[in-house]
Amino acid sequence: MVRLEMRSDIAAGVALMTIDRPDRRNAVDLSTLQEIRRHQITLASSARAGGDPVRVLVLTGAPPAFCAGADLTGVEESEFTSTLTEVLRGFTELAMPVIAAVDGPALGAGTQLAMVCDLRVATSRSRFGIPAARLGLVVDHWTVDRLTREFGWATARAMLLAAETFDGEALRASGAVHRLGDLDAALSWAKEIAHLAPLTIAGHKLALERCTSGPAFDAEVEEARRAAWASEDAEEGRRAFLDKRTAGFTGR
């Protein structure tokens, strides 16, 4: 089961997606991935239709884990791996920033889910790793590339070649985890981000995702940049700066 809820009690525009399979330590099977993918499509469609805007998405797992990996009863199915790929790339394609709130194990597919989030908040008891070498499996090249960029070469090599795991404090020291804290800390950060200019964030996220996958000039990135500069939010930001007040951004 995967829950998606708007957290209006935290701030307008903050949504929380929770993987809720505590009996399996939130290991993902095919149906769980399909639920996540449906939620991703709903979020993207709502943004395009101009519905209630989700400005920040927080991804977490019900206690006692973030996600303990893939449910091994379905990992050999080709549909499972293809759906996992869709889910991983789906988070990178959402216009809003995604924050991983990690507490407990985030292993295998759990680390993959954390690495595709834009920002990561984790407790000191969190554990990250990809134990594929203990299972005789090889992860796809896209995952290897993403892991090296998000967690660093040295950490990626230790995870992939020695099946080592790292706690939240170690990854905070290396920069792979952006803040130490629990779900409340992640939601508090989401509240802060929700007050920033959404068109700016969407343009920057698009540019960041395209940094290693295409030429220095990208037409879609440039279009997003120009749209932000010409937006009502840009004018509001300039006025707020001159008036020495907090800007009220609308995403237009």
Image (spheres, helix red, strand yellow):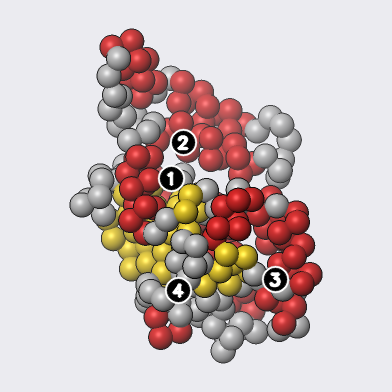
Q: Earlier in the sequence, mark 4 or mark 3?
A: 4
Q: Is residue 14 left or right of residue 61?
A: left
Q: Which residue is mark 2?
A: 201
Q: Is residue 154 left or right of residue 73?
A: right
Q: Does the CB distance between marks 3 and 2 fall below 8 Å?
A: no
102 or 85: which is nearer to us?
A: 102
Q: Is residue 195 left or right of residue 134?
A: left
Q: Does the CB distance between marks 2 and 1 fall below 8 Å?
A: yes
Q: Amino acid at mark 1?
A: Met
Q: Is residue 166 above or below residue 53?
A: below
* Residue 244 sits in quarter: top left
Q: Which residue is mark 4?
A: 65
> What residue is drawn where x is 64% and y is 50%?
174
* Residue 184 sits in quarter: bottom left
Image depth: mark 3 or mark 2 in front: 3
Q: Earlier in the sequence, mark 4 or mark 2?
A: 4
| Rendered location of residue 36, percent (x, y) | 44, 67
Q: Is residue 170 above or below residue 239?
A: below
Q: Earlier in the sequence, mark 2 or mark 1?
A: 1
Q: Is residue 224 above or below residue 134?
A: above
Image depth: mark 4 or mark 2 in front: 4
* Disc number placed over residue 96 in the picture, else none: 1
112 or 94: which is nearer to us?
A: 112
| Rendered location of residue 226, percent (x, y) | 51, 23
Q: Which residue is mark 3?
A: 164
The residues tagged by marks 1 and 4 sit, at their Cα atoms, a distance apart of 24 Å
170 or 137: which is nearer to us?
A: 170
Q: Earlier in the sequence, mark 3 or mark 2?
A: 3
